[in-house]
Image (cartoon, grey):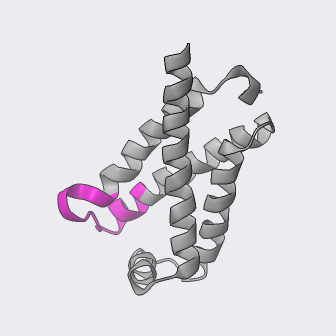
Amino acid sequence: MKAKLITYWIATVLIAFMLASGGVMYFMCPPEVLEGITKLGYPAYLLYILGAWKILGAAAICAPGFPRLKEWAYAGIFFDLTGASASHFFAHDYGPGAFHLLVPLALIAVMFVSWCLRPASRRI
């Protein structure tokens, strides 16, 4: 049971760090990030919307309580990551070794580990 809890927290912290750091980068809007989103065909202001959602999602999955909010946050993370992979696919922006396609999909696997192993107190 202790290994399950440790695995849960490792996966949760990894996903939360990925979301929060990505959200902060979106708010900082460095040239590489701006170039990346416009290359996909999205407007620059979308960075601020996604950035806020990423930071709020990271906070939601780490905060105690609010099990329904956590469910929505996990769903949002899934939509964000599948949308990222699909956007790169349809824009033919795969990156070296299909990096932009595979990394979001790998993070979905980590997110599912976090979601599946969450303690009973964090479930609906």
Q: Quadrant of residue 69?
A: top right
Residue found at the very far top of the displayed protein:
1
State yes or no: residue 19 in magenta.
no
Q: Magenta region's main secondary structure?
A: helix
Q: Determine if the magenta segment contains residue 86.
A: yes
Residue 43 in sight:
no
Q: Residue 24, image x and y in percent?
A: 56, 70
Q: Locate residue 22 relative to residue 36 in the image: left or right.
A: right
Name the residue at 45% across, 76% down: 37
Residue 51 horizontal/vertical position (percent): 60, 68
Residue 25 higher or lower than 30, as above or below? above
* Residue 67 appears in the picture as rendered: yes
Residue 51 sits above or below residue 9 on the image: below
Q: Residue at x 62, y 42 (%)?
A: 74
> In this picture, which residue range is highlighted in magenta?
85-100
For residue 115, which quarter of the picture? Answer: top right
The residue at 48%/52% (across/down) is: 81
Q: Residue drawn 72% across and 30% down?
A: 122
